[in-house]
Image: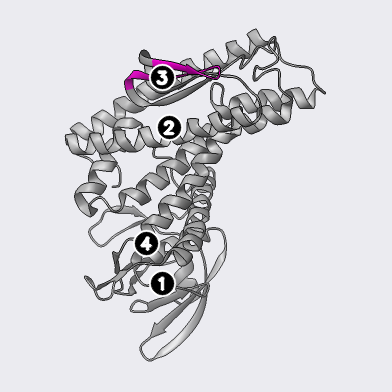
Amino acid sequence: MSPQAILTFVGILIALIIVHELGHFVAAKLTGVRVVEAGLGYPPRIWGKEFRGTIYSINALPLGGFVRMLGEEDPSHPDSLAAKPAWVRLIVLSAGSGMNFALPFLLFTISFMIPRDVPIGLTQIVQVIDGSPAQEAGLREGDIILAINDNDVRNVQEVGTQIRLNLGETLTMRVKRETEYEEIPVYARWAPPNYVDDEGEEKRQGPTGIIIAALYPGMSESESFPLWEAFPKSINTTFQVLTLARNEVISWFKGGGRPEVAGPVGIAQATGEVVEEEGYRPMLDFAALLSINLAIINILPLPMLDGGRIVFVLIEVARRGKRVAPEKEALVHLIGLTLIIGLAIVVTYFDVLRVLRGESLFR
């Protein structure tokens, strides 16, 4: 893994964490929660200055930032987070993930405004697997896929995306067959079985059971959009990413594969591969995807994370204002932190093994 890849990953991670903490900071300030310290980097502190009751600091470990609020679990001070009404605490606790959800709109907008080469070689079906939904629907080898559910598809990647956006549903493929055009409904499975290819290797079938390839490999065109077109496209892309993530999780439970987990080492490796193969322009898209992942992870109802703290507020609401004792909540978060650190160590171990074996996170 090159130093260039590591520096790029660290830069992206720092930016995403700062954006996350900025959400907590602004929400706390607007709702009257006292922010004890807002720090760039992590302690030990190098420099700090107090302004209007908050210490603004620069710290030695440049791995992001933090916001320390007064009384996150102790309501004894009126300006503490825990002393505020439940709705205020919910806003403050969810603001970090909210910022990470909002950031991709900006990143994707900028990305769409930058000229990029987009493959336009169309997509041809090179094999229809026996017994698959595609075979039952009447798709044939040689069919050229032009659109899925009225969405034009220009390349293999767009075909794959449209199919995975519609898992568990019957989608309509518009195909060109010799000189004829047909609309063919085909079901996209959650959990496709395996098949044996011509070389005797066992592989997993796709959701519809087709093998596809570019009809005209290497053909591309430059594409960019003005701001008023790029922003709506960024909104659509962000919600597509969320749909793909939801479908991926559902497919795990339905037997459609297992989750691929990566920690900082694995993500740094993936960053390097993207830079080496595509250059720096796709880093905007990659950062947007990481931001969405960070938002989802932090909002999960796990101890120590924002989502875990939100759960305690919701429990309080359900109990009509009766709080869980601060020391008990702190203990739960401590246990959660210990488990998260343990999981991070295990994931990092397997990430390092993958790097040493020369394997890719993408393959």
Return the x and y of residue 172 as percentages of the image width and height: 52, 73
- Label 3 crowd (10 A; few <14 / some 14-19 / many >=20): many
Q: How far across and how far down the image is residue 97, in percent?
A: 53, 37
Q: Residue at x 28, y 75 (%)?
A: 215
Residue 153 badge: 1
Quarter occupied by the N terminus: top left
| Residue where numbered disc 2 is placed | 17
Q: Give the residues drawn in magenta, as a range.
A: 48-61
Circle 1 SS class: loop
Furthest toward the right, the residue is 320
Sequence-first disc among 3 and 4? 3
Quadrant of the image occupied by residue 155: bottom left
Where residue 116 appears, x then y in whole percent?
29, 63
Q: Earlier in the sequence, mark 4 or mark 2?
A: 2
Judging by the rendered image, the residue that carries numbered circle 3 is 57
Q: Nearer the viewer, mark 4 or mark 2?
A: 4
317, 280: nearer the viewer: 280
Q: Inspect the image, locate mark 2, and give the three-letter code of the amino acid beneath it.
A: Ile
Residue marked by disc 4:
113
Q: Secondary structure at mark 2?
A: helix
Q: Is residue 350 above or below residue 202?
A: above
